[in-house]
Image (cartoon, helix red, strand yellow):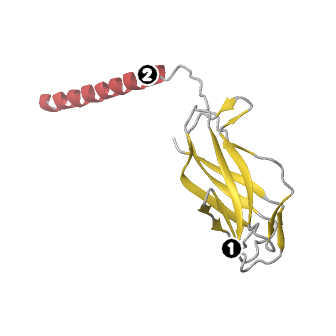
Amino acid sequence: MSAHMIKKIRIVVVLMLSFVLILGVTWSQYCSEISGSDTAYVAAFVVDAVGDSVDSLEIDGSSSKNTAAYDFTILNETNGVTSGVSMVYSVELVLSEELPEGIVVRIDGISGEKSDDGLSYVFSDDTWCFDAGSTEEHDHTLVFTADLSMISSSIDISDISINILAEQVD
């Protein structure tokens, strides 16, 4: 073997050893730096609805009483715990039976999106939101209005449920 060839082999061996040494140092440094601990905290997600219990709402088509209203409040605080996240919400109205033709329903003057089966409505507005960490209450009024040219008798609207559909935004 020539001296020139031996010199090339030594250079290759030195380069390989250098590579292995660098890789080993990097790996050991990586392993030694993956230590420590931390605690993860989850922010509270709180939304609640309150209102008086009502058996039914009545619209009397034979008189001038063509509306029935129900007041309720949406809160981002329950039992002293305030929501730690910002959120937007919608209100879902669930009925036991479809409203008769000639009756419309709104929350704060806003029309809802009616489901295919007519048993639920979803209402939303860009202003229906809560800020993280700030206790807030939003008062709303659900109003059923009858077109008296289409409704001539008394109608009881019963078995009403209000659900809050909330989504975190931050």
Dot label at residue 28: 2
Q: Is residue 32 above or below residue 129?
A: above
| Image quadrant in which you'd find residue 95 | bottom right
Query: Does dot 1 land on a helix, a strand or a loop?
Result: loop
Query: Does dot 2 land on a helix, a strand or a loop?
Result: helix
- Mark 2: give few (<14), some (14-19) or many (20+) Cα within 10 Å: few
Residue holding disc 1: 116
Q: Is residue 133 above or below residue 156?
A: above
Instruction: Please provide percent x and percent y for residue 54.
Output: 84, 53
Residue furthest to the right: 55
At horizontal 38% and vertical 25% (from top left) the residue drawn is: 26
Alpha carbons under labels 2 and 1: distance apart? 63 Å
Residue furthest to the front: 64
| Front position among marks 2 and 1 | 1
Instruction: Please provide percent x and percent y for residue 98.
Output: 77, 72
Quarter of the rendering occupied by the N terminus: top left
Nearer the observer, 9 or 45: 45
Q: Is residue 15 above or below residue 158?
A: above
Taking the image as shown, residue 82 lies to the left or right of residue 31, namely right
| Image quadrant in which you'd find residue 162 | bottom right
Circle 1: residue type: Asp
Circle 2: residue type: Ser
Q: Earlier in the sequence, mark 2 or mark 1?
A: 2
> Does the CB distance between marks 2 and 1 fall below 8 Å?
no
At horizontal 66% and vertical 50% (from top left) the residue drawn is: 140
Nearer the observer, 45 or 55: 55
At horizontal 59% and vertical 57% (from top left) the residue drawn is: 124
Instruction: Please provide percent x and percent y for residue 39.
Output: 59, 24
